[in-house]
Amino acid sequence: MSVLRRGGLLMSAALLAVACGGGNQPTTAPSTTSTNPSPLPTTATQTSAPATDQPTDQPTAELTAAPSGGLDPSLSDEGVVGRITITGDARRDESRDGTYEIIGGTADGFDSSCGYSLDDEFTAVAWDDDAPEGQIRQMAVTVAAANIPEGDETISGIEDGRVYTEFMSENFFGTAYSADAADDDRTSVTVDVTRIGDGLVFDYTGLTWDQVEFTGQMACAEIV
């Protein structure tokens, strides 16, 4: 038998002995130290959406209140009410200093109203022919039609308007408080107009020819 063949037979016998358990092979104890890496610390999950510049579906803030001092035009069947506060009244022995209100109605064929005129003006007027002595019989505010806002906003500082208040009295003299700089440069007036939907509020200040100061408001439920 050749040496190469004898070597091959001896190697095969050795491998067979190992496979049958004849070999005394050492076993290795499992390691007690984990080879897995330590887990990384977790981070907090962001729960809120990141800010964006996209507009939301919420409506934008709108004008919901006007500086009318609580005037309620729904109290008037004609939808117009007014208030005036007079200070520095030295016309009579008995001053009219104070605050007065009017709820517009119909008087001698004149209806209380809020609307445009053919003169490109807008007038809010309240009448009350049943007003008791010393109370308001008529109040009116007039501004140029161009000064009526088209949407919910305020137009301030109108100085070419007119305001007029007349009291019920047996004495004609001294019953009217008027400011109209266009007709009488001794007077002055400033009007702010606020629109909310179809409603209007006029806030005004005035000075009469005889230097009586007054402030007031008129409120209209809707434009006619």
Image: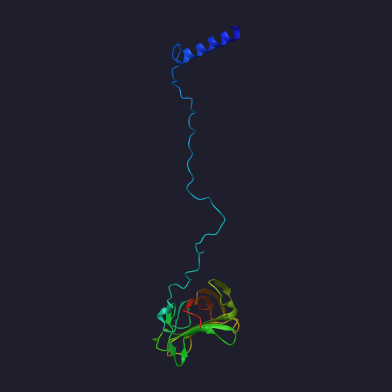
Give whichever of 17, 205 is nearer the camera.
17
Q: Quadrant of the N terminus?
A: top right
Q: How is the image coloured?
A: rainbow
Q: Is residue 99 left or right of residue 143?
A: left
Residue 149 percent coordinates (x, y): 56, 75
Residue 123 percent coordinates (x, y): 53, 83
Q: Disc count in the image? A: 0
Q: Residue at x 43, y 81 (%)?
A: 102
Give whichever of 164, 3 is nearer the camera.
3
Res. 116 in view: yes
Q: Residue at x 52, y 73 (%)?
A: 194
Q: Residue at x 48, y 14 (%)?
A: 16
Residue 180 percent coordinates (x, y): 57, 82
Q: Is residue 6 left or right of residue 93?
A: right
Determine whether 51 is above or below 164 in the image. above
Q: Quadrant of residue 77?
A: bottom left
Res. 186 in view: no
Give whichever of 220, 187 is nearer the camera.
220
Determine whether 9 is above or below 139 in the image. above
Residue 179 percent coordinates (x, y): 54, 81
Determine whether 152 is above or below 177 in the image. above
Residue at the far front: name it. Answer: 1
Give whichever of 35, 194 is nearer the camera.
35
